[in-house]
Image: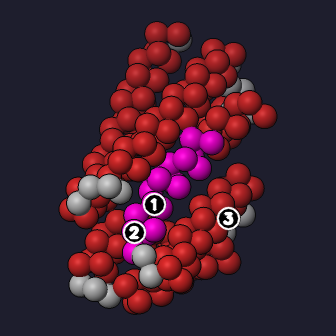
């Protein structure tokens, strides 16, 4: 991964903590410059993979819009909605991939295993729906945290949300291994 891709992605992974410290230290101008720069860099150096590129364009453009609205309205609260935007975007991406074309998780599975059996195709289709629901629920919780304290917003969006995503991925992997062993 190139530094031009890694640095902005790393900054945006730390988004909740950057927002928290920027607001707590009353460094909103510097914060907006850093976040705006990270979003612009993500737009310029978007990945070549078409689905990832589209997702990067959507989320980075929306993130940049939140930064600009926050700046021009002098309202830092707009910055709190980026995790909501990300989760809604992911939910819609998963859902639209099932409805419009090949489910995104099926595409990823076929990339790794070109001769994916029919049971695998059915499983990945269902899993894509589950991820869509998971992200929608995460978006609702992230939206609720925008009405709570900065500490709670940061804790959920900077830690708990990531732990939930990682746990869900790990549990799904364990479950998938058992299903594959059973079916083989």
Question: Mark 2 touching mark 1, by CB under 8 A?
Answer: yes
Quadrant hosting residue 65: bottom right
Residue at 66% over, 60% down: 58
Residue at 28% over, 72% down: 20
Residue 158: % across, % down: 31, 59
Measured in 3D between alpha carbons, the distance from the residue under mark 2 to the one under mark 1, in whole angstroms, is 8 Å
Residue 140 appears in the figure: yes
What residue does disc 2 label?
A: 77
What residue does disc 1 label?
A: 81
Residue 114: % across, % down: 71, 33
What residue does disc 3 label?
A: 57
Mark closer to the observer (3, 1): 1
Q: Residues within 10 Å of mark 3 (few under 14, many from 20)?
A: some
First along the sequence among labels 3 and 2 = 3
Left or right relative to 78: residue 50: right
Q: How is the image coloured?
A: secondary structure
Instruction: Note whether 42 is above or below 87 in the view shown.
Output: below
Quadrant hosting residue 107: top right
Question: Mark 3 touching mark 2, by CB under 8 A?
Answer: no
First along the sequence among labels 3 and 1 = 3
Residue at 28% over, 61% down: 154
Instruction: Note whether 182 is above or below 96 in the view shown.
Output: above
Measured in 3D between alpha carbons, the distance from the residue under mark 3 to the one under mark 2, in whole angstroms, is 23 Å
Q: Residues within 10 Å of mark 2 (few under 14, many from 20)?
A: some
């Amino acid at each position: 991964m190139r530094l031009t891709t890694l640095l902005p992605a790393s900054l945006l992974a730390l988004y909740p903590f950057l927002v928290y410290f920027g607001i707590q230290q009353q460094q909103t101008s510097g914060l907006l410059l850093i976040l705006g720069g990270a979003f612009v860099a993500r737009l310029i150096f978007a990945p070549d993979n078409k689905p990832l590129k589209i997702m990067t364009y959507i989320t980075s453009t929306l993130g940049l819009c939140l930064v600009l609205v926050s700046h021009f309205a002098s309202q830092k609260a707009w910055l709190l909605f980026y995790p909501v935007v990300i989760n809604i975007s992911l939910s819609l991406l998963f859902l639209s991939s099932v409805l419009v074309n090949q489910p995104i998780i099926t595409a990823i599975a076929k990339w790794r295993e070109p001769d994916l059996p029919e049971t695998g195709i059915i499983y990945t289709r269902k899993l894509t729906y589950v991820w869509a629901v998971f992200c929608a629920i995460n978006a609702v919780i992230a939206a609720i945290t925008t009405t709570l304290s900065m500490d709670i917003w940061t804790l959920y969006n900077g830690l708990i949300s990531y732990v939930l995503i990682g746990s869900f991925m790990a549990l799904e992997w364990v479950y998938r291994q058992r299903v594959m062993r059973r079916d083989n």
